[in-house]
Image (tube, rainbow, N blue to C red):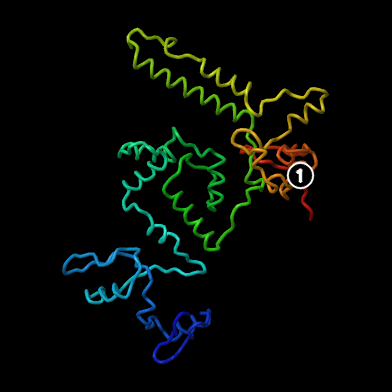
């Protein structure tokens, strides 16, 4: 306690002592609902809402402002008897949101959208429509953003939700729950995920990467069709005049021909062929690089047990980045590695 907690001459907690459950029970038993504190105790607290002078309509103090002795005197003179403040401490209720909002230069939705637009597109003059479209396309447009089934499953499990399926785009509730979880971690509630845990690392199969390249080709075809529709005569256009499949085939050929992970299969003998097919790599597009990969990524993790062979890995700069699956390891529908376990009774 930063001050003596007393009521009717009885001191329940001395200054500097920790408030325990026994003290709380004693206060409840004696029906103590309010305690007197010096005015210096309130100074420095953060108000929870706006306070207005009812006679003049003047804003005395805005929400999320720190109280000073002068502001307290001003509030007292204007007739305010009750002041609501934010509850924060150094243990499990940090003032992170309050401090963030206080240093944020934006005060409304439009100015926040413009600030985001300037960060994402520096040099371009922001307009209301362009700023709203950019923000909408970041996380809330099905055409531009897809959380995917595995992303939604991991997202919901991280937030301790019962369902594992849901929308591929983010909702306001999703963002609020993420902020609550991050604040909880900052307050010491919960733990940060282990990035090297195989429950947080999945295998992107050849089919999935080929599908992404096929989608790139389809987007190019869509753009070409729109251009031809805007330029050509709609009465004489035929479907074969508008659609050209070359961008799709070019994207697929480029993927199989020049991808970082594209290799000639080892066909020295059947065993080497099977081994090559069961090899997994942390390199490639969207993955790590040999120069940036540290010791923690290359090291053997307890979750490798039964899933990844801890011995079969190349020497040199690729050590720990290229691995082989264990004999009984397999990928599930989400791309995570699974292995059978024998239950010991």
Residue 72 rendering spot, x and y as whole percentages: 29, 74
Q: Is residue 238 left or right of residue 282?
A: left
Residue corresponding to mark 1: 306
In x, y percent, where is residue 116?
Answer: 39, 44
Q: Residue furthest top?
A: 236
Vertical relation: 235 (above or below) 344: above
Residue lying at 73% horizontally and 38% vertically, measured from the top left = 317
Q: Position of residue 121 (x, y in %)?
A: 40, 38
Going by the image, does 167 lie left or right of 210?
A: left
Q: Nearer the viewer, residue 275 or 97?
A: 97
Residue found 82% across the figure and 28% down from its top = 271
Which quarter of the image is occupied by the C terminus? Answer: bottom right
Q: Quadrant of residue 101?
A: bottom left
The residue at the far left in this view is 55
Residue 159 position, x and y percent, is 53, 52
Counting other residues with Cα less than 10 Å from the Cα at mark 1, is it few (<14), some (14-19), or many (20 or more)? Answer: some
Quadrant assignment, res 323: top right
SS state under label 1? loop
User: Measured along the vertical axis of the image, is residue 187 above or below residue 81?
Assistant: above
The residue that appears at 54% across and 50% down in the rendered structure is 162
Q: Nearer the viewer, residue 44 or 33?
A: 44
Number of numbered callouts drawn: 1
- Which quadrant holds residue 31? bottom left
In the displayed structure, 89 sits above or below 11; it is above
Q: Residue at the front extreme? A: 123
**Camera-nearest residue between 130 and 7:** 130
């Amino acid at each position: 306690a930063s001050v003596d907690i007393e009521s009717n001459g009885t001191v329940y907690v001395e200054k500097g002592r920790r408030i325990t459950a026994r003290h709380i029970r004693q206060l409840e038993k004696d029906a103590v609902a309010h305690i007197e504190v010096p005015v210096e105790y309130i100074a420095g607290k953060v108000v929870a809402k706006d306070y207005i002078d009812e006679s003049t309509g003047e804003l005395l103090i805005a929400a999320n402002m720190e109280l000073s002795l002068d502001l307290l005197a001003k509030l007292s003179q204007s007739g305010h008897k009750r002041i609501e403040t934010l509850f924060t401490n150094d243990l499990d209720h940090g003032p992170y949101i309050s401090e963030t909002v206080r240093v944020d230069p934006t005060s409304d939705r439009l100015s926040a959208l413009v600030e985001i637009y300037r960060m994402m597109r520096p040099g371009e003059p922001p307009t209301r429509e362009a700023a709203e479209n950019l923000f909408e396309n970041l996380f809330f447009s099905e055409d531009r953003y897809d959380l995917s089934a595995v992303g939604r499953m991991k997202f919901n499990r991280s937030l301790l939700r019962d369902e594992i399926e849901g929308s591929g785009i983010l909702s306001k509730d999703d963002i609020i729950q993420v902020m609550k979880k991050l604040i909880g971690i900052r307050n010491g509630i919960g733990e940060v995920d282990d990035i090297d845990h195989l429950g947080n690392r999945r295998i992107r199969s050849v089919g999935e990467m080929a599908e992404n390249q096929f989608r790139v080709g389809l987007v190019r075809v869509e753009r070409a069709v729109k251009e031809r529709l805007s330029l050509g005569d709609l009465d004489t256009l035929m479907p074969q005049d508008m659609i050209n499949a070359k961008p799709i085939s070019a994207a697929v050929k480029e993927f199989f021909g020049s991808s970082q992970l594209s290799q000639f299969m080892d066909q020295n003998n059947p065993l080497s062929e099977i081994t090559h097919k069961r090899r997994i790599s942390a390199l490639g597009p969207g993955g790590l690089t040999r120069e940036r990969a540290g010791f923690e990524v290359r090291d053997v993790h307890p979750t490798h047990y039964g899933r990844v062979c801890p011995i079969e890995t190349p020497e040199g700069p690729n050590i720990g980045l290229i691995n082989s699956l264990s004999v009984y390891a397999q990928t599930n529908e989400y791309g995570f590695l699974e292995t059978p376990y024998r239950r010991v009774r």
